[in-house]
Amino acid sequence: MMVDRRQLLVLGALSAASTTLAACGGGDADDGSGAATLNFAFWGNDDRATKYQQAIDLFQQQNPAIKVQTSFAAWDVYWQQRSTEAASSSLPDVLQMDLAYLAKYARTRQLRRLDDDLGDGLTVNGIDPNILPSGRYDDGTYAVPTGTNAFAMFYNATLLADLGIPAPTTPLTWAQYQQFITDVSAKGAGRPERVYGSVDYTGVFWIFLHHIRQSGKDPFTGNKLNFTEADLTAWWESTAALRPTALLPAKDVTALKPVSPFAKSRTASEFAWDNQLAGYLGDSGGKGEFKQLTLPTDSGTSGLFYKASMLLAVAQNSEHPQQSIKLVDFLINNPEVGKIFGTSKGVPVTQAQRDAVQASGVDAQVLAYEESVKSSVGASQGALPEGFGTIETDFLTIAEEIAYGKTTPADAAKRWFADATDALTQ
Amino acid sequence: MSTVRGRAGSIGFHLGSLAVLVVVLYPGVWTVASSFKDRSQIVGSANPFTATPTLDNFRTALSGIAGISFWEFFGNSLLLAVLSVIAVVVSSAVSAYALARIRFPGRDLWFALMIGTMLVPAHVMLIPQYIVFQKAELVNTFVPLLIGKVLATDAFFVFLMVQFIRGMPRELDEAAQVDGAGHGRVFWSIILPLLRPAIVTSSIFAFIWSWNDFLGPLLYLKKPDMYTLPLALRLYIDQTSTSDYGAQIAMAVLALVPVMLMFFVFQRYLIEGVSTQGLKG
């Protein structure tokens, strides 16, 4: 599927020549007011695409010299496209970034180091100083957060009222939460479609990480795990007593995938990022009222933090860095953009955009939740270690084996630790 | 006696076949039937049928994504598929004729090399290819997806046709040559008409492969208005926000229609092409 060898050589020579010329000509030389066409890529569905298009139209109105060409794809497709582009140094000028991929792209210097632009072209003083460092890797800033999520314990108020069980209230210890699960599952046993208190929540990596944070530790130090195999064994053993009857069996969870059993009113509570509310409402078909609480804790510390749900980065290979930064600045700070997106990309990081969100329905509930946990959130999570995606998936898979009774927590923890150590040192 | 046993056996065989058929067809039936369900009823239900069928999913699918209509995706897929078929048939037939009938220096080596390309996994060449097309500024055009086909690099099709031509009696070409026909004439008047079954087989495969291709368009088409159907299908699903399985399934069903039509119309040739190709040696 190729051009023949001679043509290839010619192409190679031409392109080498043209890149050299471009470097001499200097894309950097222009002052940001110059005309340019920017490529901007993001992941998301059609709804997000429509919103971005509105925001971009606004940007182009204000900066008629700059044209923005958008491209969007689903999450996994998005990262496949980016990694091929990274291999040929042709990343889009501006790209949506995630904490799990930041380290990979920053380490290989595919992203522009933004430190010199902060305050000079890129206004970030509207961003909470707790959240801004999310875009840091090693010694530099390579991305700017646009929105935040916080973890939450959801419960289905309608379902609980139906079962005649009082809604949980905070503060809640893990033991009290387990009692709640047991109560719901006992009452729900008589239903034609049995209702449970929860799925086996110990299988979700982020809950475990919050649990670690509750003990006052950061789950990662650089590229290393900052917890022990014993911590993990204890965590997986903590629901051993509930597994036989009080937790929704793993096979039922699988049968409903990819929809959450919580959205389908099969369980009364679930842990998730607060913006998941919109997804639950969409999948529930209008049945159920979903409310958020902070996590159960034994230490009094919630372990919560504002996670940058989405970041924006500028590619190192961009020929128009000034214009790209202008676009990032616009997307982060412009109040109209805040109004367009609401909380669909997470709660906006800048006060100006938060104020512009016309809060109603889902937006209002998510905003209220993040406001309510403001006093208890800790330091933000920075770039996740490279390989985070792998260890997270592995965690899920191994925990599922425990849920199916194929392995014991101790063996599982041992295996996960070996795998994770491998994955993180690669 | 024997006929009774024969009939019982035959009934048993057919019942068994039907049972297997139900199992095999179930996923397809589920997909088609689910496209008529309300979107919140689809996932998690093994029963494909619903008491309250709706066309909403098709309405959503046809209304397009982010201002790009369904027909634009459909058009992109169709254009690529049709151009692929033309490119594959023309280039492979000519190349196959050369490799099967013309003696030129190094022919066997070239043939072996061509077969060799089938042994190299496509993924190995993915990134180098991407870099070449990117430097040539051909990303976001259909060129990277078609140029290989124009240049007969789909070794499978060339090989299929070479084997087919080798099975034809040489006396036919020789007779034509005696009458003064050159290679062009022999190819056009003798080989090409006889090659029809192989051409039909290649066309069908080229069409279906192009229609279903995901990785190629994924890498080379970045503008949403250039997306093909397999790419567009993914836009309804987003792990990080809400997903519309109803519209996705409806679009999947719509995307299946041309391939199904193609198959039903040409299946006779498909089987004929493959079996005759295998027989001659």
Image (spheres, coloured by chain):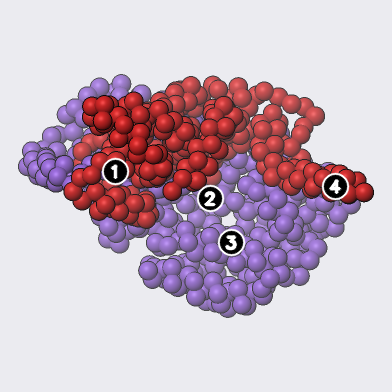
Q: CA distance from mark 4 to mark 2?
A: 70 Å
Q: Quadrant of the N terminus of chain A?
A: top left
Q: Nearer the viewer, mark 4 or mark 3?
A: 4
Residue nearer the viewer, A168 or B192: B192
* Residue drawn at point x = 35 percent, y = 37 percent: B171
User: What x and y, as percent, mark residue B104?
Assistant: 20, 45
Q: Are marks 4 and 3 on the same chain?
A: no
Three-letter amino acid code at the position of disc 4:
Gly
Q: Nearer the viewer, mark 4 or mark 2?
A: 4
Q: Nearer the viewer, mark 1 or mark 2?
A: 1
Q: Are marks 4 and 1 on the same chain?
A: yes
Question: Which residue position holds label 4?
Answer: B6
Q: CA distance from mark 4 to mark 3?
A: 54 Å
Chain ID for label 1?
B
Question: Which residue position holds label 1?
Answer: B99
Question: Which residue position holds label 2?
Answer: A150
Element type where label 3 sits in the image: helix
Three-letter amino acid code at the position of disc 2:
Ala
Chain ID for label 3?
A
First in residue order: circle 4 vs circle 1:
4
Q: Which shade of the palette goes to chain A?
A: purple
Q: Which chain is red?
A: B
Chain ID for label 4?
B
Q: CA distance from mark 3 to mark 2?
A: 20 Å
